[in-house]
Amino acid sequence: MSAFLLILTVALVIIVVFQIGKSAELARILRGEEGKEETNSSLALITSVIGFIILILSIITIFIYKPKFLPVSASEQGVWIQQMINWTMFFTCTVYIFTTFLLFWFVYKYQYKKDRKAFWFPDDLRLELAWTIIPAIVLTVLVVLGIQKWFKVFSPAPSDAIIVEAIGQQFKWNIRYAGADKILGKKDFSLTNSDNELGINWNDKNSHDDFMADEIVLPVNTPVLFKLGALDVLHNFNLSQFRMKMDCVPGIPTEYWMRPTISTDSMRLITGNPEFDYEVNCSEMCGSAHYNMRKVLKVVSRAEYDKWAKDQSENHSYYKTVVLPAMKEKGGEISMNTDTTKNNIKH
Amino acid sequence: MEQTIEKIATADHGHGIGHHEEHHHVETFINKYIFSQDHKMIARQFLFTGMIWAIIGGLFSVLFRVQLGWPDATFPALEQLFGNWFTDGKLDPNAYYMLVTMHGTIMVFFVLTAGLSGTFANFLIPLQIGARDMASGFINMLSYWFFFASSVVMFSSFFVSGGAASGGWTIYPPLSALPQASPGSGAGMTLWLISMTLFIGSTLMGGLNYVSTVLNLRTKGMDLFRMPLTVWALFFTAIIGILSFPVLVSGVVLLVFDRTLGTSFYLSDIYIAGKALSNSGGSPILFQHLFWFLGHPEVYIVILPAMGMVSEILATNSRKPIFGYKAMVFSILGITILGFIVWAHHMFMSGMNPFIGSVFTLFTLLIAIPSAVKVFNWLTTLWRGNIRLNSASLFSIGFVSVFISGGVTGIWLGNAIIDVQLHDTYFVVAHFHIVMGIAAFFGMFAGVYHWFPKMFGRFMNETLGYVHFFVSFIGSYIIFWPMHYLGMSGVPRRYYSFKEFQAFSQYDDLNKIISMGAIMVFIAQLLFVANFVYSIYRGRKMTKDNLNPWQSNTLEWTTDVEPGHGNWKGAIPTVYRWAYDYSKNPTGADFTPQNVPLTEEELANESKKH
């Protein structure tokens, strides 16, 4: 019933407007004006006015909504991106306002008049050159500035960077820290099975102090290198408040680094939101719950981070808390030998 | 005197393709309306099919906008209409992703490629260059029926278990390759791949026909540089299609192999649904390269025909020659060439080497130059013109406006460094919908209103045309302008719901506005369809003494009210001049059609120049 009503309402709206249009056309024929729509000068006025209103609103609303844009970048990298946006904003807004203004001004100014003749102006080399060369210069500036910053953002990570591994999986993030030794244990896809989804090689001693984290915790002002991967389909490790993202690709390791500059607590003050948290989300379509891959990221002082990391590594290392107990329970049946694990995959 | 001039002009251009006799063949219902080889009928078939797809694609966008605008409300009415896409009055996430995917596929391929370029390339190329039909009427017919078959296959995919494809219109593997990753990656994806292969067959047959027709069948005197810009645009569009669509076939075929034969072109080291797969060594990024090698030129396939028609309609309605005709032709050429070397700007964040990103930034921003030239040339065409406003010219002006608004944000996204922040946010959605969605639709509407009298011998209702334009124009800005703000706030695209995230859940007001705009614009399009169908049967008639209602210069207006197969009853008109002699002589005619011989004065001027 309600579906029927919905269709009926839409149909009625269309029929009403349609009838108005039809009678307007009939009236025009009665007045002998059919096919002379160009004489309708109010149309030129309406078009220009609407054009100008759109132009003005499109600029004003930028300032209205600006407070709701992302807060100031929480990473050094994001600040460089913001600079580039500012430059681009300046040039594109100028062009947008200038050309849109001309367009709707011409529509009004040069509207059809019976006794006017259009100006014969098929070509002008100087004008053509001007609006080829000027955009070329502006774009060159933008390209040079952009590429410089691009290489700065995707430069090799500093050697003191903390290494965090983020592996996307439908529909969650697996976060692994390197632990006290600062080296991530080796992985091997052939070791992957339901007991060891990430395929970590437990024979590599470096893996024994690695820990999996529910929340990402980072020290402020210290570079962090994210090593990215995906188990099943493409994901994208997006840190919107830090302005950084990169796809996670099954079979192909990717990475980026950044330097967080604003701690969670400071950002709570900046945004005036005591509940504020940095959030990781997935930015590459990955299936039906793509919109639910949330992970909280905390930026804390170096001291807090060191304390947290030490505790995690010592008391919550994945190997000690999960792998060892499981092995003991099964009486050591889970062999750490690569070859036998390979056979496990087969069935 | 007149006669001597005509003789000179004819002698100048030698022997053209002057076969003057009428085509005599028996017309039955089937070979006139169904398996027709007449380019005009095929054009109408493309247009009708495209319109049906546009209604479906538009309806899909309304459905998912309802979910995004009112995430907490329930809609029992929609559940009654769409069955199991809705559960308890709410759109199901899988159905949401299917609708998003199919909206993209339908709009990009079926509406804006087949419906736009299929319609107008078929209709306008032979009529405007003075040919009796396409180079091969039969292949042209096949082109439509391949499109039809492709449509049937795609439509049937809604009814298979798991539903139609749901991995985004870009169908990135591994999501699209693994049925266990998403319900839409099962039978629905198989049908998507079959449908797309048929579709590419259709595009290739059409494209080869357009190119050979333009190169070989121009009438006497129709030099390349006398062709209307519509023909230039459609010509380059066809070339782009011929060169890029086959690459998508290769991408699709490899994906079919991965799905069915167990190959590993795109798959490597995958652990899914509790199982490690044996695929090794493939690269999902390879698929993205193959896809975007078509996918990017595809946006020019969509926009160039619209640009061509808008150039033609703006010149006609401002009673002025198009400004910088040659610059326009060369900018189309520039866009065509550059369009092939910018594809990886869709992949800045895909994990490819950052060095490649910098190269593609350079080429991408370069392509803004020919685009800027075109905008300035349109503006100069309007400058000091005598602008007539009708539905066609309103939509052309609207086209220029949205092309500017959507074009400038391309300079943001084309710069890899800014793309780091904005990639896969609503900013991107805003950009490409305005610059290639709305703009191409506006170009298409302008074309429909302008050439409707030639297609159906009647006029569309102008008042309804104005309503259609103003609602669509204002509505487009209401829908897409706020999406820039969502993008600047970091809101990611392809999200079924934003509730989970603190950062993205505070824009309910904007999302509501956008959804209301979408519904409003959709209803305006239904009004257009009503106007279109009504006018075919009951519109104001075009009469014999008003064969050229817009006082246009191009050849299609020299034909009968409803030209038969063969287009011109008698001889094909000879062409003596370019298509843009509007208001040439301050005291003389307002327009001079291409088939009018040069006057003595003009001849004298010509010889002075040389």
Image (spheres, rainbow, N blue to C red):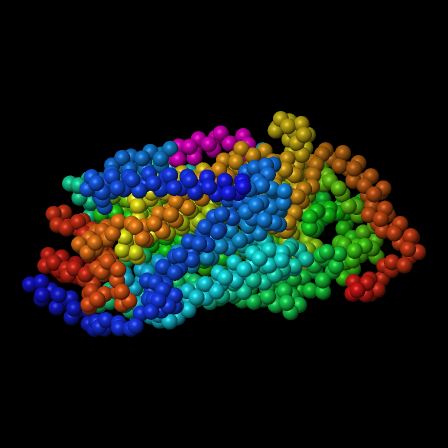
Q: Residue at the spot x=70%, y=36% of the render?
A: A298
Q: Is-magenta flag for residue A59?
A: yes
Q: Start and end of the magenta stretch?
A: A54-70
- State the image quarter where residue A53 is shown: top left
- The foreground one among B174 and B269 is B174
- Residue placed most toward the observer, B437 or B466: B466
- Which residue lies most toward the left here? B1
Residue for point 65% across, 66% down = B264
Q: Quadrant of the N terminus of chain B?
A: bottom left
| Residue B223 in the figure: left or right of residue B259 | left
Indicate the position of residue B19 as horizontal and vertical percent values: 23, 73
Quarter of the rendering containing residue B605: bottom left
Q: Is residue A71 visible?
A: yes
Q: Is residue B450 visible?
A: no
- Taking the magenta stretch, the answer to whether it contains residue B136 is no
Q: Residue B235 occupies which quadrant of the picture? A: bottom left
Residue B104 against residue B222 in the figure, above or below: above
Overall secondary structure of the magenta section: helix
Using the image, determine if residue B556 lies above or below residue A183: below
A57 lies left or right of B60: left
